[in-house]
Image (tube, helix red, strand yellow):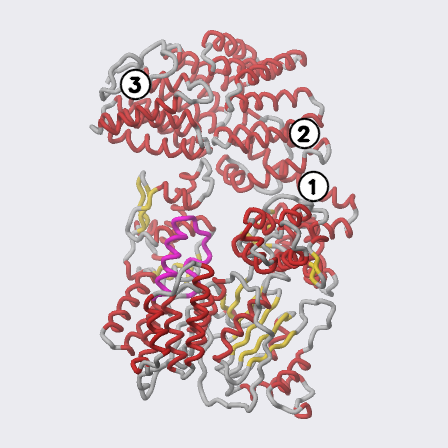
Amino acid sequence: MSLRYQLLGPLRIDDGRRSVPIGPQKPRVMLAMLLLSTNERVSLDRLVTELWERPPRSAVANLRTYASGLRRLLGDLDGTPDGGKRLLTNASGYLLRIDPEELDVHHFRVGGERGRSALADGDFGTAISRFRAALRLWRGRPAEDVRPGPDLAARLTLLDEQYLTIVEDLMEARLAVGEHGAVPAELRLLIAAHPFRERLRRQLMLALYRCGDAPAALRVYTETRATFADQLGLEPGAELSRLHVAILRRAPELSPPQPPSRTDVVGVPAPVGVVVAAPDGVAAPAGVPAARGPRREPAEPPRQLPAEPVAFVGRTQELATIARLQEAAATARPQPRTIVLHGPGGIGKTTLAVRVAHLLADRFPDGQLYLELHGGGGGLPRVDPLHALGRLLRALGLPAAAVPTELTEAAALFRSVTATRRLLVVLDGAAGVQQVRSLLPAGAGCLVIVTCRRPMSTLWAARLRLGQLSVAEGVELLDLLAGDDRAVADPVAAARLVALCDGHPLALRIAGARLAARPDWPLAVLSDRLDNERVRLDELRADDLAIRSSFGETYRELSDGPNPDDRAAAAAFRLMALLRIPEIPSPLAAVLIGTSQRRALTLLDRLAETHLLEAVEPTRFRFHGLLRLYAEELAEETDPAADRRSAVRRALTAYLTTAIRAGQLLRPHRSDRPVDPPVLAQLQTIDDALPWLERELLGLLAAVGQAFDAGPELARLCVQLMPPVAGWLQKGGRWAEADTLVAVAEKAASIVDDPAEQARVRIMRATLHWHAGRPEQARAELESVLRTWRRLGDREGEGRALQALGWFHHRTGDLSGAAALIGAAVEILAEGYPGWLAVALHNLAEVEFERCDYQAARRHLDRSLTMRREQDDPAGEAITLVALGRTYSQLGRHSEGLAALTAGLRLCRRTGNREDEWEALLSRSEVHLRLGDAQRAQPDVEEALALVREIGDSYGEAAAVRQRGRVLGRLGWDARARECGVLAQGLLDHLPRRRDGVLETFLVRPGQPTEVDVDVPSGRYPSACMPNRSA
């Protein structure tokens, strides 16, 4: 069965019967990457980089999961097992095999090429038809429901560029057939969104000149020249300058062509970034049809728009969206003629609406109506629909006595009066659908722009959600408002000020006004005042503007409303701010609020609809910074302190308990104390635990920071969480996060005042000392811990401390001391502590490995592996399998070594263990070399090198570069092999800590000639033995 893949809008797959969205965010990103690389293999590295800014250790395993899900979806759609082998994979990446005819991007590009061909041949009618057919494929921004990484973002930007080029080609063809009177308003919007596209400006100048308005055409040139000089330091290009001169001399070649007897003025339904919903859930494309039917020319059309905003910055995407919407003229399909701009208070909805209205004013010769509905509060009563209709009808010339006093009659009269007119109506500050439904004109040539704090989802409209300004846009706005180029002169301070204002336009306008009032203030003065969260909202006040008042209008709609659900949502808003974590999943919110998960999600959705919260994903929510401060204030004023403390304790207990359970599944030997069953997620296996921890890590780091001083019980949970989760972080190469967690656990342990708990934290601190190149501090911590546990009579603790101290001696090269200490630990832990006994046996095996007693090492590893499997410890099993694989190879049993290394590598990826993953890859590459297969060794080395560079392991990078040199030498690339040898030596000479003796023993062959005539560095100390070179 043929499928249709739709990228030009929300990502969808259509099987001819239905259009199916693609599940969670990351599979969507993966599919978009594959679709834009049709029938080309996309490497694992590219996909990992695209899906994660900081890839988890399980990234490759996660990709396999996403690929399996996509295969199932494709199979369900086309009725074939596993998607008819559409999605192919191998060790290096994935390939999506499709017919180009199945992809809307292909049809778009082909349509554009065919239109340009007709344009070049002078067949303008055909060109217009083909361009419009291509542009009609756009249902929104390309992959608008996908959060792209760097590669995908660049490819989507290219699609936007191709769209604009076709729009320009379409304008060229329309000018060629005499449609100069229809295009200026559309061109003005396009230029507002894309101010540096000279071709659009040239087309506007030509259109205005052909409309008989040469002064306006010349003003466009003057504005262009000023804009280019101010923002780019450039003059307009030669083509624009020649047109300027031609207009000045009224060149005859600029005269308009004779219009055809009949021109099909059909626009392009291609809104970008909008969501269109027809009544009864029927989807419809967005667009604003051009006028049809006769026009009436009133003697004095109303011109009610407020003055055009002076300090207007950013919103280029929204302007581009509306420009595309204007291209969507009357088509065979019905089009909404209303645009809803929605977002929180003070976000700039009115400013954008007025800006757009001025840009479009020329398109609506019968008038522009503006009505402030006061639906956002502000202390003024809402304008009821009947009163609003009276004002609109009187503005259109009806005497007051002719306006009906019944709403239905007044609405019917308004529809009659507007049926044949071309009007622009701006309804500013609507409370909701009920207030505006009767105010919508009937004319096909009318456009309504509504601003509202809610999306008005039951209204048939194109919707644009406005958000915060970017840092660059915020700095530009501050510069305009503060004056004297103060923000541009101090961009660092300006960027800090934008961050403190959370990119919120109203907050930035207040900050700019305060700076304008105090020209003696450096920007840092105001930043320092805003830096104090307790007074930030107090400082964001100037004259009649206050950020707190803006937020309060929306909040009071809920808290003071008659709907009990709204009042419950207001209470949830206050409580949500008490948890200072970046994103709050709905199950955690349910515990915090004290309700069911279903009920909590209903309340959170309500808050998201009113823009008091932002929905990051369907079940994850976050605050913007200033709104969080406002909600915290409300909670302190409204909710009793005991209730607030109880809610926070309840939520943090649930959060940390679930995290402890996840950590126990990942590292069972590190935390065997039972916890209450987790209530936030059903975690049964490591495959449940790892994704949960990955998703919640940033929240957990914030939560422990809030929890450790919230009472001894929560402090104890922080300490209990630390060993398994910090161990997982360390194995994942995330040492900074591990350090953060250990630092909090140290403070929590001091509150608990339990020497045993403190000792557990200090063992982890010793590991961090070692990694940071502080061996003496690591030794002191471990020796102190050993004394503590002996004083407490804790045999398990004593055994753990002995094996940890033995690990330290091993790492510092004292093999005899290490063997003695770990041997003593084995004797103690054999008394009944199997989890830690397996760890000690593994560490003892590595000492024996470095002492070249491979048979002893194998015996210890066999015992350790058996015990880890009995305890269902896949993370420990992974580590031991990697060590066993090396040991088998040293014994000449290379095939068994490969099998063990491959199994260990698979488990390392499954458990997020990146440290042992790269060691397994290098070790497997070495076994391939010993078997004479350099071709198979190379991808392992390259993957290991990429991994160690990603996690920042300096020794790992040196070892990988050195191994790459050996592989390249075997492949005959002698010069590149020598370069690797030199680079590796430089890296090894500057290590912060001693090399890994086990890996050095395995990978380096002291005294033996290398594959090329170059000194591949063998290590800072000589190994006591040589690897077995059998096979």
User: Residue lying farthest left?
Assistant: 972
Residue at (30%, 49%) from the top-left corner?
Answer: 85
Q: Position of residue 826 (x, y in %)?
A: 52, 12
Which numbered tag is attached to residue 650? 1
- Region in magenta: 139-165
| Front residue of 372 and 1031 | 372
For the point 56% across and 25% down, the residue is 670
Mark 3 Cα within 10 Å, few/some/many (few <14, many 20+)? some
N-term mark: 2 or 1 = 1
In the image, taking residue 752 as reference, residue 620 lies left or right, namely: left
Q: Quadrant of the N terminus?
A: bottom left
Instruction: Tell me the number on the disc at residue 273.
Output: none
Image location (x, y in percent) of residue 266: 38, 78
What type is the residue that disc 3 sits on?
Answer: Arg
Q: Residue 893 bears which disc, if any?
A: 3
Q: Position of residue 901 (x, y in %)?
A: 36, 26
Is disc 2 surrounded by few (<14), some (14 to 19) or many (20+) residues within 10 Å? many
Q: Are marks 2 and 3 in contact (CB under 8 Å)?
A: no
From the image, which quarter does the C terminus lie in?
top left
Q: Is residue 149 magenta?
A: yes
Q: Quarter-wise, where is residue 721 in the image?
A: top right
The reply to whether the C-beta atoms of the residues labelled 2 and 1 are less than 8 Å apart is no
Query: What residue does disc 2 label?
Result: 748
Left or right placement of residue 576 versus residue 849 in this view: right
Element type at mark 3:
loop
The percent position of residue 17, horizontal first and vertical second, equals 39, 65
Question: Label 2, label 3: how many angstroms apart (C-alpha)?
Answer: 49 Å
Helix, strand or loop at disc 2? helix
Task: Name the one closer to the observer, 957 or 1026.
Answer: 957
